[in-house]
């Protein structure tokens, strides 16, 4: 039997954080220290269960970011580090994680994420829409285009339509590692 746990990074014990990091390293071939830091500082949706009853089977984080669109600075809930342990995939755990994170959408102007090609159909099936406009990042040296991310950024607007033009340029705030 599995259960969902919602907790802020500050509420997770060191052993829980270590279990989440181990899950990420097992789920992704190239999970870096930067990727780990991107998953911290916000809310975590954890699916816990397994043989021991407290194994982390799946995880996703929602962290605060700023996105610039058409002269507006939007408060964004950015989804990071969504993964399911390889031995527990296809059991609905990723859906549990995303339902919990999407439930936090009213606190933000929009939710966003950068999807792998493998996961895009999953997110789109949940109502996430691709951002069609060009992407960039606000670096310490000015705005720089991020063409490798074009087409991989997905958004979910909570509540009423924000009137966002999905074809407009979109710029994210700076961070080390993968910026999107």
Image (cartoon, grey):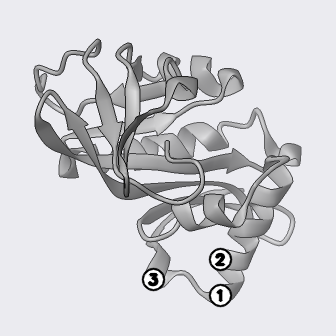
What SS does tag 3 mark? helix
At 12% across and 26% down in the image, what residue appears? 162
Looking at the image, is 165 positioned above or below residue 55?
above
Q: Are marks 3 and 2 in contact (CB under 8 Å)?
A: no
| Residue of label 2 | 17
Q: Nearer the viewer, residue 87 or 165?
A: 165
Give the answer, above or below, for where 153 lies relative to 75: above
- Looking at the rendered structure, the secondary structure element under dot 2 is helix
Compared across the picture, whether 133 is left or right of 56 comes to: left
Whichever of callouts 3 and 2 sits on the residue coming sooner in the sequence is 3
Q: Which residue is mark 3?
A: 10
For residue 122, say whether it is visible. no
Q: Which numbered disc covers residue 14?
A: 1
Q: CA distance from mark 3 to mark 1?
A: 10 Å
Q: Residue at x 42, y 64 (%)?
A: 43
63 and 174: which is toward the camera: 174
Distance, label 3 to label 2, CA atoms, is 10 Å
Q: Position of residue 48 (x, y in %)?
A: 67, 63
Query: Is residue 44 at least partly visible in the picture?
Result: yes
User: Quick check: marks 1 and 2 in contact, CB under 8 Å?
Assistant: yes
Q: Residues within 10 Å of mark 2 (few under 14, many from 20)?
A: some
Q: Estimate the x, y position of residue 81 in percent, counting from the top left.
A: 60, 51
Measured in 3D between alpha carbons, the distance from the residue under mark 1 to the one under mark 2, in whole angstroms, is: 5 Å
Q: Quadrant of the N terminus?
A: bottom right
Left or right of 85, for residue 59: left
List the single residue furthest toward the bottom. Answer: 14
Residue beneath the point at 20% across and 15% down:
165
State the residue at coordinates (29%, 23%): 169
């Amino acid at each position: 039997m599995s259960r969902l746990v919602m907790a802020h990074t500050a509420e997770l014990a060191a052993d829980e954080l270590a279990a989440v990091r181990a899950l990420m390293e097992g789920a992704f071939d190239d999970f870096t220290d930067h990727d780990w830091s991107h998953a911290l500082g916000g809310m975590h949706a954890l699916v816990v269960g397994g043989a021991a009853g407290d194994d982390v089977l799946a995880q996703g984080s929602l962290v605060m970011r700023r996105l610039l669109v058409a002269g507006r600075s939007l408060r964004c809930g950015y989804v990071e580090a969504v993964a399911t342990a390889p031995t527990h995939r296809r059991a609905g755990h990723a859906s549990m994680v995303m339902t919990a994170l999407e439930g936090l959408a009213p606190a933000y102007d929009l939710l966003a994420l950068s999807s792998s090609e493998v996961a895009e159909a999953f997110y789109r099936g949940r109502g996430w829409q691709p951002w069609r406009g060009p992407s960039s990042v606000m670096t310490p040296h000015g705005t720089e285009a991020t063409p490798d991310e074009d087409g991989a950024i997905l958004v979910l607007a909570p509540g009423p339509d924000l009137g966002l033009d999905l074809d407009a340029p979109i710029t994210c705030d700076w961070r080390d590692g993968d910026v999107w």
